[in-house]
Image (cartoon, rainbow, N blue to C red):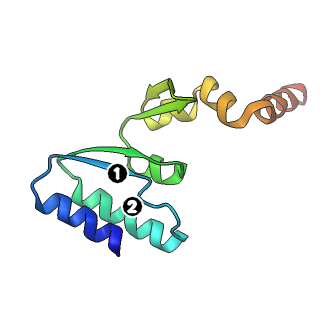
Amino acid sequence: MQRALEIGVTIAGGASVILLDEPTSGMNRTETAQMVELVRSITQGKTLVMVEHDMGVVFGLADRISVLVYGEVLATGTPEEIRGNPAVQEAYLGTLHKEAAHAAGSHA
C-alpha cells in the first residue's frame, strides 16, 4: 500500500516520466500482480523507466528492455527480442542453457 501511495503521489504531481526501483521487491504473487496492474494503468501515456529483477514483472510491463550485466548494457530490444537473445540466455542461464541446447540438439 505504501508503494502504491508513493506512485500515486508521483502521478498526482504531474510527472510525465516515472522512475521505479524494484517496485515489487518483497511482495508475494498476489501483491506483485496488483502492483503490475497499478503501474500499467497509471503509466499509460507516460514514460516508465524501471529497474526490476522479477522478469515476469518486466515482461508484463515493458515495451523495450535493456539487460545489464555488471553495469554494462548487454542487449536492448522488445520483450520478444530479449527472450530470444542468445547473449541474454547465456548471461542468465549460463552453462545450464548450453547443456540444455546441446542435449536437445543431440536428440533431434
Tell me the number on the disc at residue 36: 2
Badge 1 crowding class, 10 Å Cα cut-off, few under 14, some 14 to 19, many 20 or more, is some
Residue 9 placement (x, y as % from top left):
18, 65
Secondary structure beneath disc 1?
strand
Q: Is residue 56 left or right of residue 10?
A: right
Give the residue number, with chain letter if any, for mark 1: 20
In percent of the image, x 12 and y 62: which residue is there? 12
- The answer to which of 68 and 43 lies nearer the viewer is 68
The quarter of the picture where residue 10 lies is bottom left
Residue 20 placement (x, y as % from top left):
34, 51
In percent of the image, x 14 and y 50: which residue is there? 15
Residue 73 placement (x, y as % from top left):
48, 24
Q: How many circles with numbers are drawn on the protein?
A: 2
Q: Quadrant of the C terminus?
A: top right
Q: Is residue 75 above or below residue 22?
A: above
Sequence order check, earlier mark of 1 and 2: 1
Q: Is residue 9 left or right of residue 103?
A: left
Marks 1 and 2: which is nearer the front?
A: 1
Secondary structure beneath disc 2?
helix
Q: Quadrant of the N terminus?
A: bottom left
Tell me the number on the disc at residue 88: none
Query: Which three-letter amino acid code belongs to the residue tagged 2?
Result: Val
Query: Which three-letter amino acid code belongs to the residue tagged 1?
Result: Leu
Q: Is residue 82 above or below residue 28?
A: above
In percent of the image, x 63 and y 24: which residue is there? 86
- The answer to which of 68 and 105 lies nearer the viewer is 68
Q: Is residue 52 left or right of residue 84?
A: left
Residue 19 placement (x, y as % from top left):
30, 47
Badge 2 crowding class, 10 Å Cα cut-off, few under 14, some 14 to 19, many 20 or more, is some
Q: Is residue 43 above or below residue 83?
A: below
- The answer to which of 55 and 18 lies nearer the viewer is 18
